[in-house]
């Protein structure tokens, strides 16, 4: 069995999610041989978050592909409002931003990832291997020298000057790296379901009441609904029966009462476990982590994808030069952590605060009301301006500094079932 041949100066990225695909595209665009490995056969997975933030749209503009990107199916959300108990608040109003696009684009994530793959494929140095699951790391003299993986055709080894772990919150690469993880604690899980959308539905994105928070993502003909529940309580809800669950949904968002019957049984409700953590050190010689693999994000505020993209942009800015020269030092990798650790920690902290403020304590079953000082403050624009900045742009927005090194763009294929 032959491993794919990569010449020196190469980068192998484990995971074709937002972080891995964006980094792969940026490095290939900068003329660097890059191989992205994705365990699934396609990007068609649900429940991964559909939010493309103004800062990500800004990155698309800097890359010169914004117009093309916005041709993909999407829904624009210039303002996000929520109902907390009996009160309605503006969570974020993108018109306050100075970015080119003053809206969040709700785009199915497979469209977003497919777009990045399409752009990457325009460069001959971009290689994407689907159906290749990374299972281990190759270590030589204390340095990570490549990865081991499984494909439908059997086991393979890939050698590279740099391995990037971008394989998400259950990262195998992270488990194999031996690096220490700090758990930040996530008291909640999320139950996902679909309910049909009617033309006269309110346009609120979140409801919080009686110890529960329900988020609604507009998918055109239906709502993708996410109900936050206290960790470990999903089993109890199941034991209480689907009728009880339906009544609970209608109680939080009363306009849904006429369609909760669409949840026929528990097979229509998916449980997604939430974890929030971060690596103490994001790198080892020959290996660095970005996105959820470096710091698993909670769904609160829908900012994890943005953070993953910003990590990718920062990482490309820092390592493109050293990769081109064929020597990536530990110092270069440490720069990525120094650049991205502060926004990560602060974002995770703000997410925890938002969960407490908007969702309430999840085990509280009484009616929800914001404390009076918060209600008073909500009468001013200050809190919504701060939230808008956090939700729309993030804490340290990154800008593309890598060049478009290839004038002669040529197509490199996506390999779905690589012969190796
Ligand atoms: C329930 C829930 C809802 C969320 N909703 C939102 C939202 O609306 N908006 C938002 O911004 N954020 C949301 N988030 C957070 C967001 O999903 C993550 O922060 C973001 O996807 C991180 O991107 P990533 O590329 O680092 O990782 P991922 O998106 O997890 O991508 C990792 C990729 O690696 C692949 N992979 C995994 N293991 C391997 C392996 N061994 N070999 C090869 N490939 C592998 C996976 O298939 C996947 O394609 C949500 C999180 C949860 C838990």
Image (spheres, grey):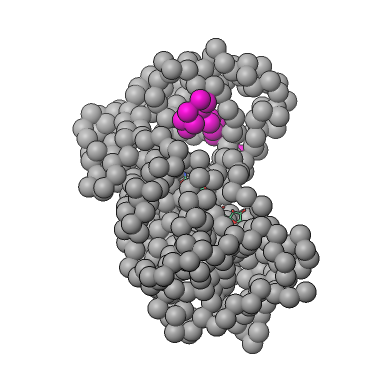
Q: Residue at x 57, y 57 (%)?
A: 16
Q: Residue furthest bottom?
A: 141
User: Which residue is more in the foreground, 356 or 157?
Assistant: 157
User: Which residue is more in the foreground, 254 or 152?
Assistant: 152
Asked if residue 397 is positioned above or below residue 257 in the image, the reply reads below
Q: Residue furthest top?
A: 258
Asked if residue 187 is positioned above or below residue 283 in the image, the reply reads above
The stretch drawn in magenta includes residue 216? yes
User: Which residue is more in the foreground, 119 or 146?
Assistant: 119
Q: Is residue 245 left or right of residue 387?
A: right
Q: Is residue 238 left or right of residue 389?
A: right
| Secondary structure mostly seen in the magenta stretch | strand
Q: Residue at x 32, y 54 (%)?
A: 61
* Residue 341 visible in the current orientation: no
Task: State the extent of the magenta-drawn residues as a range.
Answer: 214-231
Q: Position of residue 339 (x, y in %)?
A: 38, 67
Q: Residue at x 35, y 22 (%)?
A: 87
Q: Quadrant of residue 14?
A: bottom right
Q: Residue at x 53, y 30 (%)?
A: 225
Asked if residue 101 is positioned above or below residue 264 in the image, the reply reads below
Q: How many marks?
A: 0
Q: Position of residue 140 (x, y in %)?
A: 65, 84
The stretch drawn in magenta includes residue 107? no
Q: Position of residue 108 (x, y in %)?
A: 50, 40
Asked if residue 361 is positioned above or below residue 187 in the image, the reply reads above
* Residue 46 visible in the current orientation: yes
Q: Quadrant of residue 130?
A: bottom right
User: Which residue is more in the foreground, 113 or 386?
Assistant: 113
Q: Quadrant of the C terminus?
A: bottom right
Q: Is residue 401 left or right of residue 348?
A: left
């Amino acid at each position: 069995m032959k491993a794919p041949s990569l010449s020196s100066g190469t980068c192998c990225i484990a995971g074709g999610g937002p972080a891995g695909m964006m980094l792969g595209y940026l490095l290939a665009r900068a003329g660097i041989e890059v191989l992205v490995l994705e365990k699934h056969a396609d990007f068609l997975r649900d429940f991964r978050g559909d939010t493309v933030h103004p800062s990500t749209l800004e990155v698309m503009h800097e890359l010169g592909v914004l117009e093309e990107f916005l041709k993909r199916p999407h829904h624009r959300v210039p303002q996000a409002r929520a109902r907390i108990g009996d009160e309605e608040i503006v969570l974020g109003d993108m018109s306050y931003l100075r970015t080119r696009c003053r809206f969040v684009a709700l785009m199915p994530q497979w469209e977003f990832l497919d777009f990045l793959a399409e752009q990457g494929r325009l460069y001959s140095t971009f290689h994407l291997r689907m159906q290749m699951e990374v299972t281990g790391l190759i270590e030589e003299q204390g340095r990570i020298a490549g990865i081991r993986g499984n494909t439908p055709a059997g086991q393979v080894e890939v050698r590279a000057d740099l391995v990037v772990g971008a394989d998400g919150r259950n990262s195998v690469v992270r488990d194999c790296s031996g690096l220490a993880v700090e758990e930040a604690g996530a008291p909640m899980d999320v139950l996902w379901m679909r309910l049909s959308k009617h033309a006269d539905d309110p346009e609120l994105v979140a409801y919080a009441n009686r110890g529960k928070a329900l988020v609604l993502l507009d998918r055109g003909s239906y709502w993708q609904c996410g109900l936050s529940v206290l960790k470990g309580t999903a089993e109890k809800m199941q034991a209480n029966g689907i009728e009880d669950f339906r009544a609970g949904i209608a109680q939080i968002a009363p306009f849904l009462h006429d369609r909760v019957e669409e949840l026929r049984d528990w097979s229509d409700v998916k449980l997604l476990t939430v974890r929030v953590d971060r690596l103490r050190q994001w790198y080892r010689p020959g290996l660095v982590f970005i996105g959820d693999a470096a710091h698993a994000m909670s769904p609160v505020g829908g900012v994890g994808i943005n953070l993953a993209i910003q990590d990718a942009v920062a990482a490309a800015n820092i390592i493109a030069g050293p990769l081109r020269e064929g020597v990536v030092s530990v110092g270069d990798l440490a720069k990525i952590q120094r650049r991205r650790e502060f926004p990560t920690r602060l974002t995770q902290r703000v997410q925890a605060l938002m969960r407490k403020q908007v969702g309430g304590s999840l085990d509280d079953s009484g009616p929800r009301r914001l404390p009076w000082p918060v209600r008073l403050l909500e009468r001013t624009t200050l809190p919504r301006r701060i939230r808008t900045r956090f939700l729309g742009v993030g804490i340290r927005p990154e800008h593309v500094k890598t060049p478009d090194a290839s004038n002669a763009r040529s197509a490199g294929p996506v390999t779905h079932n690589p012969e190796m």
